[in-house]
Image: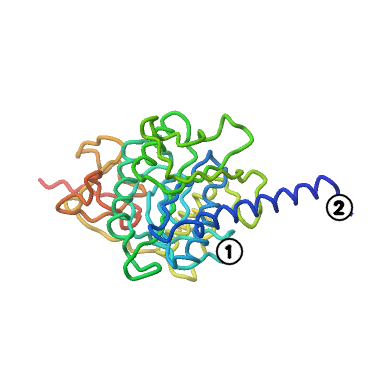
Amino acid sequence: MVRGGEGSEEARERDRAWEWEAAAAAVAYDSCDWPPPVVAVCGPGNSGKSAFSRLLLNTLVGRYKKAAYLDTDVGQPEFTPPGFVSLHVLEEQAKDFNILYLRNPKRCFFFGDVCAQKNPKLLLSYIFSLYDYFSKELHHFDEVDSPERPGIPLVINTSGWVKGNGLHVLKEMLKYACPTHVVRLSTTVEGKNVPGGTFWLDEHEANTSVNLVEIRSAHDSPRHLLVKKEARIIRDIRLIAYFRQCLPMDFPVFSYDDLIQGFASVQPFQLPLSKIQVIDLHNQVSDNVVHHCLTGTIVGIAISAPVPLSDHCSTPCCIGLGISGSIYILLIN
């Protein structure tokens, strides 16, 4: 015998699972063959944007064989450690939505913070630069249905910062990307939701070609679709998993303490401070105190380019993370 409350909860989960799957299928299969869809997924925090994006990516890969993913959520990224804005190309469908994956991005930038409010202008410059790279290099990267019409679809996962300056960032992002579809996840608390309609456009810019998709948020969502996140714990897990790659496979790592112990046994890479350029993304730091700021810090590693890779961003692309240990200043008389 099933209690009424339990039965109705299961029925709501089934209904929402069907709603999400139907929305993903509509975006992937009701779209024209050319051009492949560019889809922005929007909604307040913890509404299930990443979970729906995963489902949508699986569906798009099923049709197009490849799909690109632009992750703009620096606090809870899907495939990288926290603090990144990244672009990925997926060629395989995820078999388990409850597993957190780390993937090497096609291109990424190090934001250096888990809060987008730290520097909205820098965040937008990263997003615009990665979208430009996608448009130039990937939208025509491979064949889809015929040799004459190459291209792959794109899913843009946005952050849950949708009020105040966060809404401005979202609007600017959507204006720049001109998505073919905008998926809006809405909660029962209307005041927390993203505005309806083509809210990012001015009245004279009304765009009737964009497809608006409305679905319910992931509150009490289907368990097989949503990885329930506790932001701080998930960030810790991702960082530990990332730096775990520096240690032998048989070295046991279950916490930050284990990680630090492991690093103590590894011979660090050494180079003169004069051989590196230090870019502080959010503050101005004088050269004479930069070594104090670097000690014991997680840093983004990049290779400097003779000219900026993008008109929007002068920061070089990131190739990975490092931990800056002790810095020794030698005084020569």
* Residue that mark 2 sits on: 2
Indicate the amino acid at tag 2. Answer: Val
Q: Is residue 18 left or right of residue 78?
A: right
Q: Is residue 173 visible?
A: yes
Dividing the image into 4 quarters, which one contains the N terminus? bottom right
Give percent across and percent down for residue 228.
60, 50
The earlier-in-sequence mark between 2 and 1 is 2
Image location of residue 185, percent across then percent down: 56, 43
Q: x and y percent of residue 64 in the render?
A: 44, 65
Q: Which residue is nearer to you in this view: 19 or 85?
A: 19
Count of numbered tags: 2
Measured along the vertical axis of the image, is residue 162 above or below residue 221?
A: above
Question: In front here: 306 or 130?
Answer: 130
The furthest residue to the right: 1
Vertical side of 180 occupied by 165: above or below: above
Tell me, yes or no, if residue 325 can be seen here.
Answer: no
x, y (%) of residue 291?
26, 44
- The residue lying at 60 percent from left, 43 percent from top is 217
Q: Label 1: state its secondary structure.
A: loop
Secondary structure type for disc 2: loop
Q: Look at the numbered discs 2 and 1 and tell me whether their residues touch, using CB distance below 8 Å.
A: no
Residue neighbourhood size for the residue with mark 1, other residues' Cα within 10 Å, grouped as few (<14), some (14–19), many (≥20): few
Question: Neighbour class for label 2 at 10 Å: few (<14), some, many (≥20)?
Answer: few
| Quadrant in the picture for the C terminus | top left
Q: Is residue 161 left or right of residue 277?
A: right
Res 118 → quadrant: top left
Which amino acid is tagged 1?
Asp
* Residue under label 1: 96
